[in-house]
Amino acid sequence: METVAIIGAGRMGSFIARKLNSQYNIILIDKDLRKCGLLAKEISAIATDSYSLLALSDYVILALPADAIHQAISELKSVLQQQQVVINVSTNTEKIALDPLKKLSKIAAAKIIGHAQHMASTGELPLIVIDSEDITIRNRVAKIFSLLGTVCFGDEILVKNINNIASEEAIRAALNIMKRLEEINIPPEYISFAIRNVACGTMSAFALGEGGPFVQKLIQKINQQ
């Protein structure tokens, strides 16, 4: 069984680890050893804060915020091996940022169209866009991420644009819902339910083409405004 090391045990790193652990040995690397250790115990993985254990892995997944990637790359330089594949899942970090590692390992991107917390809690499938200059590596990475959801090959920049626009518009909608409900004196504790259940459910139904007559009337009303 091949080994996948996941750097970052936050929401996305944890989501990926739980999806892969049935088919791969998992090494979790995070500065928060308690959080990392609890997840490792749950899925029978190895927990550590040391990059030295990367020597045991076939794949290294960078599941870190964009502002933490630079430091990770600096630490990776001294431990990577030629046969290893480094996979970046950070939406706002492009492959060019990993250029310092090109001579040390294989590089790929696996960009996820999906929200980690939402996917974990609802079971909603993400779409993962695999991007690599090497066809063989691209296929290997696609095999790994097929355990998370639907995969396709494409340009990672597409996912950056999709996720950023979708997130921005979702927050804009949530703020607008909050404002309108506050204007009619709806209690704050009700507003959270309205956003999480009614708004998210309606948007999901619309995306799936299952909105029904009520949603169709709303679309017609909004288009006429």
Image: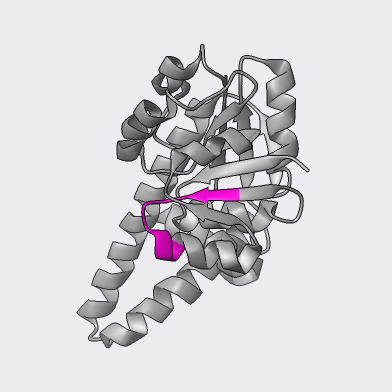
Give the quadrant of the N terminus.
top right
- Drawn side of residue 204 relative to residue 144, left or right: left
120 or 177: nearer the eye?
A: 120
Q: Is residue 200 above or below residue 143?
A: below
Judge by depth and name the residue closer to the eye, 43 or 129.
43
Percent across and percent down for residue 205 are: 61, 63
In this view, the residue farthest toward the top is: 103
**Looking at the picture, how far across and down is residue 127, in whole percent?**
63, 44
Residue 36 position, x and y percent, is 47, 59
Residue lying at 73% horizontally and 29% vertically, measured from the top left? 140
Task: Specify whether residue 61 is in view.
Answer: no
How many numbered markers are drawn? Answer: 0
Residue at image location 76% in from the left, 50% down from the top:
23
85 and 144: which one is in front?
85
Examine the rendered structure and indicate whether residue 89 appears above or below residue 201.
Answer: above
Position above or below: 26 against 73: below
Q: Is residue 139 magenta?
A: no
Q: Position of residue 88 (x, y in %)?
A: 51, 33
Would you say residue 50 is visible in this rendering?
A: yes
Q: Quadrant of the C terminus?
A: bottom left
Q: Nearer the viewer, residue 48 or 209?
A: 48
Q: What's drawn in magenta, residue-wise?
A: 27-35
Q: Residue at x 75, y 37 (%)?
A: 143
The scheme the figure's colours follow is one colour
Indicate whether 134 appears above or below 122. above
Q: Quadrant of residue 10?
A: bottom left
Residue at left offset 49%, top offset 75%: 197
